[in-house]
Amino acid sequence: MEYSYLFYIVAGFISGSILFGRIIPLLFKNIDVTKDSDDGNPGAFNAFTCGGPICGLFVLLLDLLKGALPVLLCISHIGTDSWLFAFVIAAPVFGHAHSIFNRGNGGKGIAVSFGVLLGLLPIWQPLVLLIVWYLLFLLAIPAKSNTRKSIYAFFTFGISAVFAVKHTMIMYGCILIAGIVIHKHYLNAVACEQH
C-alpha cells in the first residue's frame, strides 16, 4: 500500500514539473516568459502579463489541473490514510518549484498550490484558508512587494492549517506547501535584489 503512495508522489512531482507558464506562451506567442518577464518566473501571472489574458487563463487552468489531478486520483484510488499522503499533496508544488524539465528551476507555486487544494475537495478548509489569507494580504495588507505579500499569506496559511485542518496528513501537506512556496519566493527575492 505504501508503494502506491510513492507512485502518486512521483506522478505529482512529474506533473508539477511541466511548466505550462513557459510552454504555452512559447507555443502560441513565441514568448519565453523566463527571459521576457521581470522576474523570470514561469508561472501563470507572467503568462498573463507577457502572453495576454487568453494565454494566461489557459496556463492558470493547466496549473490548477496539474496540482489537482494527482491528489484527486490518489484519494479516489487509495485514500488519505498513510503519512505519505502529506507528500502526495506537496509533490506537484515541489515539482513546479524545482522542475526536472528545466534544470531544477521552476515557478513560485501559487496556482499549483490552489490546484492541489482543489483536489482535496470536499475537504474544503485548506482551500478556504488559502483563499482568505491570500486575498487578505494581496488586497488589504500593505507590503512593499507582492513577493512579501505571498510569503506572509503562505506563512499564515501554514500556521492556521495547524489549528483549522482536522485531518493530520492534510495539515502536514499544507505546511509542506507553505514551506515550499515561502522558500521559492525568498530565493526569487534574493535573486532579484542581486540584479
Image: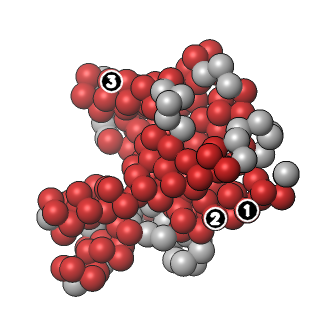
Percent position (x, y) of residue 38? 28, 63
Q: Name the residue: 32% across, 42% down.
A: 146
Looking at the picture, does residue 118 appear above or below residue 124?
A: below
Q: Are marks 1 and 2 in contact (CB under 8 Å)?
A: yes
Q: Which amino acid, mark 2?
A: Ala
Q: Earlier in the sequence, mark 3 or mark 1?
A: 1
Q: Quadrant of residue 30?
A: bottom left
Q: Are marks 2 and 3 in contact (CB under 8 Å)?
A: no
Image disc number at residue 127: none
Q: Which amino acid, mark 3?
A: Leu
Looking at the picture, does residue 68 appear above or below residue 37?
A: above
175 relative position to 127: left or right: right
**Real-space CA distance between mark 2 and mark 3, rounded to the nearest whole angstrom:** 33 Å
Graded by Cα atoms within 10 Å as few (under 14), some (14 to 19) or many (20 or more), the crowding at tag 1 reads: some
Mark 3: secondary structure? helix
On the image, numbered disc 1 is attached to which residue?
Answer: 7
Q: Is residue 160 visible?
A: yes
On the image, numbered disc 2 is attached to which residue?
Answer: 11
On the image, numbered disc 3 is attached to which residue?
Answer: 136
93 relative position to 37: left or right: right
Position of the C terminus by quadrant: bottom left
